[in-house]
Amino acid sequence: MDLSTEAGAKEWIEAGISVYGGIDILYNNASALRNGPFDTQPVEDWYFTLRNELDIPYLCTRAAWPHLVARGGGAILNVASVAAVRGAPFLPMVPHGAAKGGVPAMSKHLCAAGAPHRIRVNTIAPGMTRTSATAPFLDDPEGAEGPPGGADPRRPDRRAGGHRPRRGLPLQRRRPPSSTAPTSWWTAATARWRADPACAPGSTTSASTSATSPPRPPGTGTPSG
C-alpha cells in the first residue's frame, strides 16, 4: 500500500486496528527520499521527498486521529532527523532536510490539537544511523574515493570522495537502527500511560540521549498502528 496517499494511509491504519482491536500508539517512521545537488536536482525529486517524508506522517495521523480520540487518548511519535536542523557536508540533501524540518513543526501543532483528547505528540530526531544507505559513509572514516563516477543523486550509497562524515561524530560510534528503539519506546509508553491533558510539550528528542528504562505498560500489550 502507498502511505503517501490518503487511501493507503487509511488502509494501513484500518489493517492494524483489525488485527489488534484498536490503536494506542502511532509510530510514523515510513519514508522515502531523493537527494542530489541543489542546482541540478530535478524538481520532481523535491515533490517526491516531501510527499514521502511529510505527507506520510500527516496522512497516517489523520487516519488514526478519530480512533485515538474515541479510545480516550494515546501517543503519536513522528520520526524527524538531525538533518532538520543541521546541514550535511558529505551529501546534498535539501529536500530531505526541508521535509524533516516540517515534522517537528507539524508535531507541535498536533500536540495542541490533541491535548484536549489526551493525545500526546512528540518528535524523535535520530542522528547518523548505520543502515544499508549510510554504511558507505560511516564505514569509510578516512573519506577515501567513492565508487567510480562519483556521487549519484539517486543513490545515497554513492558519493564522491574527500568527505569524512564519521569524523563529525564525537564518540565515533556507528549506531544501528535498534539504538533508536529505547527512546521510541520510552517516549511512547510515557505518553500513553501517563498522559496529562495539561502537559503536551510536542518536544523533539534526540534518539541518542535517552538512558532511561521504559515503564512497562499495564495489561497484556500495547496495540500499535
Image (tube, rainbow, N blue to C red):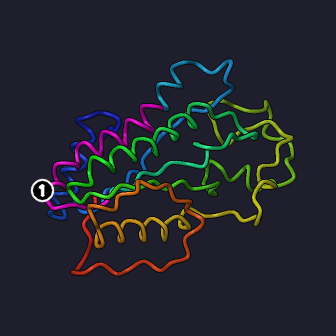
Quadrant that contains the N terminus: top left
Task: Tell which of 76 and 1 is nearer to you.
Answer: 76
As drawn, 100 above or below 94: below
Residue type of the residue flagged with mark 1: Ala
Task: Tell which of 82 and 181 is nearer to you.
Answer: 82
Q: Is residue 163 in the magenta section?
A: no
Residue segment shown in magenta: 50-75
Give the structural element (helix, strand or loop) at label 1. helix
Is 63 left or right of 40, judged from the image as shown? left
Quadrant that contains the C terminus: bottom left
Image spot of residue 40 (x, y percent): 67, 18
Residue at point 57%, 56% (across, down):
126
Say how many tags the image has: 1
Is 152 left or right of 101, judged from the image as shown? right
Image spot of residue 50 (x, y percent): 46, 31
As drawn, 192 above or below 144: below
Residue at point 32%, 58% (across, down):
120
Residue at point 43%, 71% (across, down):
186
Question: For residue 188, which quarter of the picture?
Answer: bottom left
Extreme front residue here? 198
Q: Is residue 53 in the magenta section?
A: yes
Residue pointed to by mark 1: 70
As drawn, 111 above or below 50: below
> What main secondary structure does the magenta stretch of the protein show?
helix
Question: For residue 51, which quarter of the picture?
Answer: top left
Image spot of residue 143 (x, y percent): 85, 47
Image spot of residue 211 (x, y percent): 55, 76
Residue at point 25%, 75% (across, down):
221
Is 182 left or right of 8, judged from the image as shown? right
Other-residue count near label 1 (Cα within 10 Å), few / some / many at <14 / 14–19 / ≥20: few
